[in-house]
């Protein structure tokens, strides 16, 4: 089966190393609390006036909490453009903010570059507001491409373009034309979910990846409203991303402070997204001031500190060594299977992190983890049975003391390559 393995692109390999991103839902909806998607309630542009807008506060906060990339909603389903688009009068140019001369996208992109985060832009292809509705397919495609062109030619290199499929279920886009335009303007860009995707939606907005979680797939989820998955023309290597909300809503951050997730829950989501080979993407909605709310900042900071404490430094096991045709081991310096020797060469362990080398494609389909006993060190006990590893598998185990841990791959598609194995202890 080795010949059937699909290789990721360099961009996809890089994307999986990003691991942790933050979504910013911000726009006209931020000024109309309680409004819902597709409710057709008017939201006049004159209400948009984030007098304290500080995108550096956003990006500095999430950078300090460990994020490596960010995504800004540039146009949501309501049609409001967070940049002065020439193709609609429903944009920041028609607002009192900075006398109509402001540009949220510009300030956001500049902040990302200042703090070294990868730049992601969200765009909803479908919309109901801003005097634009589905008319002739080509007319709407023109509008779509014109706005995307502004975003992809006016702000330098964009790393990630995030399309939301919600609302597009009944519309036929000229996908070949759209993709050609996007790839022509930004040849290295990664596209989320639709048409010519480089990454895929995990299929829920709770942040949890399934198990197993294969990177190679023949169909994808693309919308909460779709009743079935979209079939791909051929199998593709598509890393998954788990988007979810800090609160119970994407916008409306001033209404539901009681729903902010606890740091312990965020850690669980991380271990069931990144820990299952997917990316972790948490949303925080900036408030009407244009700032991240204080309580959300506190919780994200707490989560970031816990993440660093738990996975910032591995236990002093050596590098992974191949010890059999289908086994790799890590051991502490001085470990010995003989009784009476190497007594101090062990440690408390309750997490093992495995990373597969995906350069030539994904191989591991099932595996087991073993650890040698603390006293009867010539014997080992099974700690964990798992399925896919992919970019990363976080194996949470009962706390035990050991000096040697072994990965046994019990089912694989071709040659297995291990990037590394690390052991951790979290109190």
Image: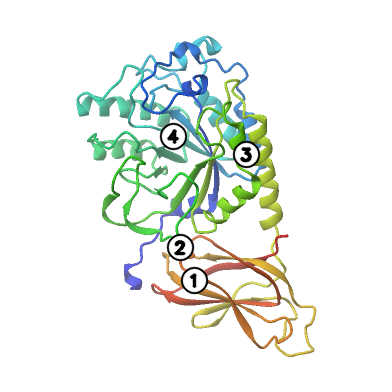
> Which of label 4 and label 1 is nearer to you?
4
At horizontal 47% and vertical 31% (from top left) the residue drawn is 73
Q: Real-space Cα distance between discs 3 and 1? A: 33 Å
In screen coordinates, is 407 left or right of 214? right
Query: Within 10 Å of the Cα at label 2, are there few (<14), some (14-19), or many (20+) other Cα atoms?
Result: some
Query: Within 10 Å of the Cα at label 1, are there few (<14), some (14-19), or many (20+) other Cα atoms?
Result: some
Q: Real-space Cα distance between discs 1 and 2? A: 9 Å
Contact, mark 1 vs mark 2 (Cβ under 8 Å) = yes
Q: Quadrant of residue 334?
A: bottom right
Q: Where residue 174 sits: x, y (%)? A: 23, 36
Q: Real-space Cα distance between discs 2 and 3? A: 29 Å
Q: Earlier in the sequence, mark 4 or mark 2?
A: 4
Say if 200 sits above or below 276 in the image.
above
Question: At numbered mark 4, what does the secondary structure look like: helix, strand or loop?
Answer: strand
Q: Where residue 361 sits: x, y (%)? A: 41, 64
Contact, mark 2 vs mark 3 (Cβ under 8 Å) = no
Q: Quadrant of residue 309?
A: bottom right
Say if 46 sits above or below 344 in the image.
above
Dot label at residue 417? 1
Residue wearing tag 3? 62
Residue wearing tag 2? 359
At horizontal 67% and vertical 30% (from top left) the residue drawn is 294
Q: Earlier in the sequence, mark 2 or mark 3?
A: 3
Question: At numbered mark 2, what does the secondary structure look like: helix, strand or loop?
Answer: loop
Dot label at residue 236? none
């Amino acid at each position: 089966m080795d010949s059937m393995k699909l290789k990721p692109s360099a961009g996809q390999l890089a994307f999986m190393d990003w691991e942790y991103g933050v979504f910013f839902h911000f726009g006209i909806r931020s000024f109309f609390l309680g409004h819902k998607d597709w409710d057709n309630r008017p939201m006049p542009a004159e209400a948009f006036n984030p007098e304290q807008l500080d995108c550096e506060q956003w990006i500095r906060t999430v950078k300090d909490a460990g994020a490596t990339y960010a995504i800004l909603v540039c146009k949501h389903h309501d049609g409001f453009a967070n940049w002065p688009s020439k193709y609609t009068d429903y944009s920041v140019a028609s607002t009192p903010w900075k006398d109509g001369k402001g540009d949220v996208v510009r300030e956001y992109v500049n902040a990302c570059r200042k703090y070294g985060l990868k730049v992601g832009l969200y765009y909803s292809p479908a919309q109901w507001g801003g005097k634009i509705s589905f008319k002739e397919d080509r007319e709407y495609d023109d509008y779509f491409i014109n706005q995307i062109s502004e975003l992809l030619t006016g702000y330098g290199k964009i790393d990630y373009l995030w399309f939301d499929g919600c609302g597009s279920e009944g519309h036929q886009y000229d996908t070949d034309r759209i993709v050609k335009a996007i790839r022509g303007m930004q040849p290295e860009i990664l596209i989320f979910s639709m048409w010519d995707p480089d990454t895929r939606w995990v299929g829920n907005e709770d942040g949890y990846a399934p198990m197993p979680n294969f990177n190679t797939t023949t169909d994808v989820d693309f919308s909460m409203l779709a009743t079935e998955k979209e079939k791909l023309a051929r199998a593709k290597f598509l890393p998954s991303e788990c988007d979810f909300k800090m609160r119970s809503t994407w916008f409306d951050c001033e209404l539901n402070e009681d729903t902010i997730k606890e740091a312990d829950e965020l850690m669980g989501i991380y271990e069931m997204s990144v820990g299952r080979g997917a990316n972790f993407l948490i949303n925080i909605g900036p408030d009407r001031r244009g700032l991240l709310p204080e309580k959300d900042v506190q919780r994200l900071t707490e989560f970031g500190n816990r993440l660093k404490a738990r996975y910032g430094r591995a236990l002093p096991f050596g590098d992974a060594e191949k010890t059999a045709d289908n086994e790799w081991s890590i051991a502490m310096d001085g470990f010995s299977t003989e009784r009476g020797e190497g007594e101090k060469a062990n440690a408390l362990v309750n997490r093992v992190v495995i990373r597969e080398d995906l350069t030539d494609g994904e191989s591991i389909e099932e595996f087991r983890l073993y650890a040698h006993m603390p006293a009867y060190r010539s014997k080992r006990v099974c700690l964990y049975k798992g399925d896919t590893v992919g970019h990363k598998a976080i194996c949470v185990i009962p706390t035990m003391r050991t000096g040697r841990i072994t990965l046994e791959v019990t089912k694989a598609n071709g040659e297995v390559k291990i990037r590394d194995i690390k052991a951790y202890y979290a109190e």
